[in-house]
């Protein structure tokens, strides 16, 4: 392998490590870049969210989240209520 090939390998490894670190930090902080694998429950009525979510807005499609089928409360991917504007 040429030295340039090693450099590309190191750059790729650093990029993957940076993405993994951001996912880990986002999950730890419970922000938009994290991954939630737990099932969420509506904070108002206690209704569990379905396993297969259907986003009702562009924001929900990009960042995760769902609207409660029972009471209409909009939640983020962590189950926290989102204030409507």
Image (cartoon, rainbow, N blue to C red):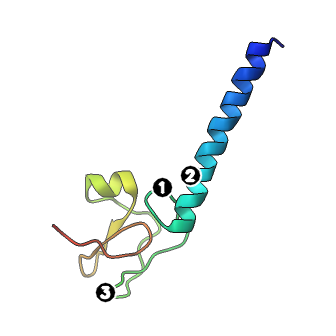
Mark 3–mark 2 distance (CA, rounded to whole Å): 31 Å
Please report contact status of discs 3 and 1: CB closer than 8 Å, yes or no. no
Crowd rating for badge 2 (residues with CA inside 10 Å; few <14, some 14–19, many 20+): some
> In the figure, 54 relative to 22: above or below?
below
Q: From the viewer's perspective, is 68 left or right of 22?
A: left
Residue at the extreme left: 85
Task: State which tag comes first along the sequence, 3 or 2.
Answer: 2
* Label 2: which secondary element: helix
Mark 3–mark 1 distance (CA, rounded to whole Å): 25 Å
Please report contact status of discs 1 and 2: CB closer than 8 Å, yes or no. yes
Q: Which residue is mark 2?
A: 22
- The residue located at (62%, 51%) in the rendering is 21
- The residue located at (61%, 44%) in the rendering is 18
- Given residues 9 and 68, the one toward you in this image is 9
> In the figure, 31 relative to 61: above or below?
below
Q: Which residue is mark 1?
A: 33
Q: Position of residue 31 (x, y in %)?
A: 45, 63
- The residue located at (74%, 14%) in the rendering is 4
User: How many marks are shown on the rendered structure?
Assistant: 3
Please report contact status of discs 3 and 2: CB closer than 8 Å, yes or no. no
Q: Quadrant of residue 6?
A: top right
Q: Position of residue 52 (x, y in %)?
A: 44, 63
* Label 1: which secondary element: loop
Q: Which residue is mark 3?
A: 44
- Given residues 52 and 27, the one toward you in this image is 27
Choose mark 3 or mark 2, whichever is in front. Answer: 2
Task: State which tag comes first along the sequence, 3 or 1.
Answer: 1
């Amino acid at each position: 392998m040429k030295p340039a090939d090693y450099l590309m390998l190191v750059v790729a490894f650093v990029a993957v490590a940076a993405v993994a670190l951001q996912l880990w930090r986002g999950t730890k902080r419970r922000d938009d870049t994290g991954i939630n694998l737990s099932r969420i429950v509506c904070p108002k009525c206690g209704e569990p969210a379905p396993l297969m979510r259907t986003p009702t807005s562009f924001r929900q499609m990009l960042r995760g989240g769902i609207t409660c089928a029972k009471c209409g409360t909009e939640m983020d991917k962590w189950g926290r209520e989102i204030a409507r504007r």
